Image: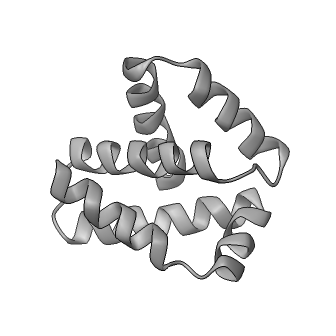
């Protein structure tokens, strides 16, 4: 798990600040970006739980380091911060379902 967390953190740190702003500016763009990353993870053979755990790490990072850029992101951040670990894990699964549609 620590190795996965390290890889996720490394990838998040690699994103150019301008690119990050571009991704987060529009919720539609954010969903497309997340969908692309999920598809890549699936091609690499990551299972549902691995994808959900990765999604949790990204959501934790966003909740702790980024200001929401739109209403949808603000709502997601509030839901994330108000939930316990189990609820956050469920929300991660829901986010995966959302971007797959």
Question: Is 56 situated left or right of 32 in this image?
Answer: left
User: Residue 25 at x, y = what percent?
Assistant: 79, 65
Identify whether 42 is placed above or below 51: below
User: Residue 39 at x, y = what percent?
Assistant: 36, 67
Question: Is 54 situated left or right of 45 in this image?
Answer: right
Residue appearing at x 46%, y 79% in the figure: 14
Residue appearing at x 63%, y 26% in the figure: 79
Identify whether 18 is placed above or below 32: below
Q: Nearer the viewer, residue 101 or 36?
A: 36
> Which color mode does the image show?
one colour
Residue appearing at x 23%, y 41% in the figure: 49
Question: Is 18 situated left or right of 47 in this image?
Answer: right
User: Residue 69 at x, y = what percent?
Assistant: 81, 55
Identify whether 11 is placed above or below 98: below
Question: Is 27 situated left or right of 98 in this image?
Answer: right
Q: Nearer the viewer, residue 76 or 9?
A: 9
User: Residue 85 at x, y = what percent?
Assistant: 39, 22
Q: Quadrant of residue 11?
A: bottom left
Q: Nearer the viewer, residue 26 or 17?
A: 17
Residue appearing at x 73%, y 71% in the figure: 21
* Badge count: 0
């Amino acid at each position: 798990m620590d190795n996965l967390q390290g890889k996720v953190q490394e990838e998040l740190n690699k994103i150019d600040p301008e690119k990050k702003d571009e991704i987060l500016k529009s919720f539609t763009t954010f969903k497309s970006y997340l969908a692309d990353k999920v598809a890549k993870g699936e091609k690499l053979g990551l299972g549902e739980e691995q994808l959900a755990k990765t999604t949790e790490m990204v959501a934790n990072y966003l909740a702790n380091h980024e200001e929401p850029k739109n209403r949808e992101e603000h709502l997601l951040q509030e839901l994330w911060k108000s939930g316990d670990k189990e609820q956050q894990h469920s929300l991660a699964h829901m986010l995966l379902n959302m971007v797959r549609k």
